[in-house]
């Protein structure tokens, strides 16, 4: 299939997340993961007059999807610099923020980016092609123990130590360069039935490390909670349990460990009030239509007044 014919990204939990933002027509909103602009287009529809949307994405490819609407501004940056860039645009407080974490379908479908084991290509995996170490550089330089941690912590792979050892052995013979090189190292560790799932876990783990995703998420959540006006909404869609745990803890307690602080009367002290007590997940219809949505989890909170 020609690359142009592929959809950049199908937005996940669109209706639910937009409803969660409770858009005020003259409000200031930020979509920190603009991607194909699927969520952003819906947000902009709800704005009038002074209403504004700022769309962040660290991938220059996403800028091509920028919305031709005077209420929209694209910001090519990592969302870990949220406050800095909003400040630059003269914004000190916002009414709502949406984060639809991780990579887009565009990343998986572009064989030159190295995100997918469906293609042979350079093992890059950087969302921002202009900065940081590629996945190949990381595999060729990280100490064995650090590699094992990446696959254990981010990939939840039980044989992470053996995988790390095999990576070090392989790179001593020849530099690891492509997705195929990485696949050749991994495949002997996975059984046929579980191969696809475990390869996805290994690729995901490497991607999380390459892009510093967990640290960026922590910085985002802290800055978002400072920027949000009282009554403002934060809407976050996660795709794996580590991300979800972090978001869940932070929303419940205002810290990443989920340590509950109570006031004199025993009420939990948190900067947020949950809008959905139970996590929102896609229904069967959405999963059939868009299998990528399968692992999505949506959480919505309001900043306490
Ligand atoms: C799941 S996609 C979002 C799709 C979007 N909601 C849509 O409807 O098209 C995630 C996007 O966020 C971007 N992204 C991920 N982490 C980021 C970060 N730390 N800073 C900025 N952009 C990031 C990725 O480049 C990708 O385009």
Image (cartoon, rainbow, N blue to C red):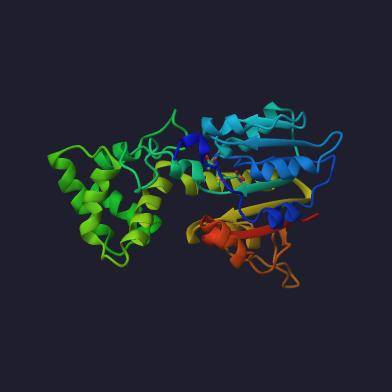
Q: Position of residue 261 (x, y in %)?
A: 65, 65
Give the residue displayed 84% in from the left and 34% down from the top: 50
Q: Is residue 269 left or right of residue 202?
A: right
Give the residue displayed 30% in from the left and 49% down from the top: 146
Q: Does residue 245 appear anywhere in the picture?
A: no
Quadrant of ligand 1: it is: top right
Q: Residue furthest right?
A: 49
Give the residue displayed 81% in from the left and 40% down from the top: 47
- Front one among 215 and 56: 56
Q: Residue furthest bottom?
A: 266
Q: Position of residue 61 (x, y in %)?
A: 52, 32
Q: Which quadrant: the C terminus? A: bottom right
In the picture shown, does residue 197 fall above or below 112?
A: below
- Front one among 76 and 38: 38
- Front one among 221 and 180: 180
Q: Is residue 272 left or right of residue 175?
A: right
Q: Position of residue 24 (x, y in %)?
A: 83, 46
In the picture shown, does residue 215 fall above or below 246?
A: above
Q: Position of residue 299 (x, y in %)?
A: 65, 59
Q: Residue furthest left?
A: 173
Q: Which quadrant: the N terminus? A: top left
**Residue 278's image quarter?**
bottom right
Give the residue displayed 73% in from the left and 56% down from the top: 20
Q: Does residue 284 appear anywhere in the picture?
A: yes
**Residue 290's image quarter?**
bottom right
Q: Is residue 119 left or right of residue 90?
A: left
Q: Is residue 173 left or right of residue 220?
A: left
């Amino acid at each position: 299939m020609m690359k142009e014919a592929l959809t950049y990204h199908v937005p996940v939990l669109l209706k639910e997340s937009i409803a969660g933002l409770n858009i005020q027509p003259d409000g200031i909103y930020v979509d920190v993961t603009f991607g194909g602009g699927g969520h952003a287009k819906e947000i902009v529809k709800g704005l009038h007059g002074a209403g504004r949307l700022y769309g962040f994405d660290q991938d220059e490819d996403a800028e091509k999807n920028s919305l031709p609407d005077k209420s929209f501004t694209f910001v090519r940056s990592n969302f870990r610099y949220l406050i800095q860039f909003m400040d630059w645009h003269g914004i000190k407080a916002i009414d709502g923020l949406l984060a639809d974490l991780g990579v887009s379908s565009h990343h998986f479908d572009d064989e030159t980016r190295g995100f997918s084991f469906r293609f042979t290509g350079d093992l890059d995996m950087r969302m921002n092609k202009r900065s940081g170490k590629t996945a190949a550089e990381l595999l060729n330089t990280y100490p064995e123990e650090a590699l094992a941690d990446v696959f254990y912590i981010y990939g939840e792979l039980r044989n992470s130590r053996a995988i790390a050892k095999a990576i070090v052995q392989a790179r001593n013979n020849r530099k690891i360069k492509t997705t195929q090189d990485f696949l050749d190292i991994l495949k002997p560790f996975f059984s046929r039935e579980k191969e696809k799932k475990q390869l996805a876990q290994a690729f995901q783990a490497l991607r999380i490390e390459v892009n510093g995703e967990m640290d960026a998420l922590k910085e985002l959540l802290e800055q978002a909670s400072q920027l949000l006006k009282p009554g403002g909404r934060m809407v976050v869609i996660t795709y794996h349990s580590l991300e979800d745990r972090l978001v869940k803890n932070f929303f419940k307690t205002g810290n990443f460990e989920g340590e509950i602080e109570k006031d004199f009367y025993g009420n939990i002290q948190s900067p947020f009030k949950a809008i959905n007590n139970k996590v929102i997940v896609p229904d069967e219809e959405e999963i059939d239509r868009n299998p990528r949505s399968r692992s999505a989890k949506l959480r919505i909170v309001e900043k306490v007044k």
